[in-house]
Amino acid sequence: MSKIQENGGEAPKTKPGLSGVRTTNFFRVFNFELFVKPNKVVMGLGLTAITGCVCYIAYMNAMSENKQDQLYEQFNEDGTTRIRRRTSRWD
């Protein structure tokens, strides 16, 4: 008789993926993602952390663009000063 008929019509039970393959402890330590069940809580925390990092980098980039000195003080020959907006020669 085949295995399907012995189990009452069910397919033989095997471990999915690499968890059924014999491996060394070294391989399991350095590739633990292949052997651990997906955890939605940890995945959510990781997604939140990555999103927070990207948002913080974007915030810092926007603040550095706004902080560039747009105004400067121009000293005239007669000793007076005037505040001017910084312009580019490319404009």
Image (cartoon, grey):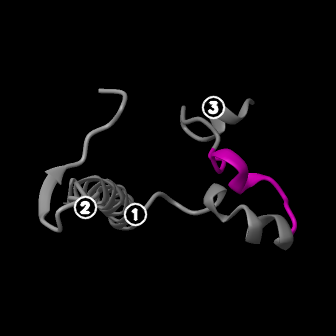
List x then y, in percent, for residue 1.
Answer: 75, 30
Front-lying residue, 72 or 78: 78
Looking at the image, which residue is at 62% across and 59% down?
Answer: 33
Is-magenta flag for residue 16?
yes
Q: Which residues are magenta?
A: 13-24
Disc 1 element: helix
| Precedes in sequence: disc 1 or disc 2 | 1
User: Relative to residue 91, is residue 78 drawn left or right?
Assistant: left
Looking at the rendered structure, the secondary structure element under dot 3 is helix
To which residue does mark 3 refer?
5
- Name which residue lies at 65% across and 51% down: 15
Q: Which of labels 2 and 3 is toward the front?
A: 2
Distance between mark 1 and mark 2 Cα atoms:
31 Å
Q: Is residue 41 left or right of residue 77?
A: right
Label drawn at residue 67: 2
Q: Residues within 10 Å of mark 1 (few under 14, many from 20)?
A: few
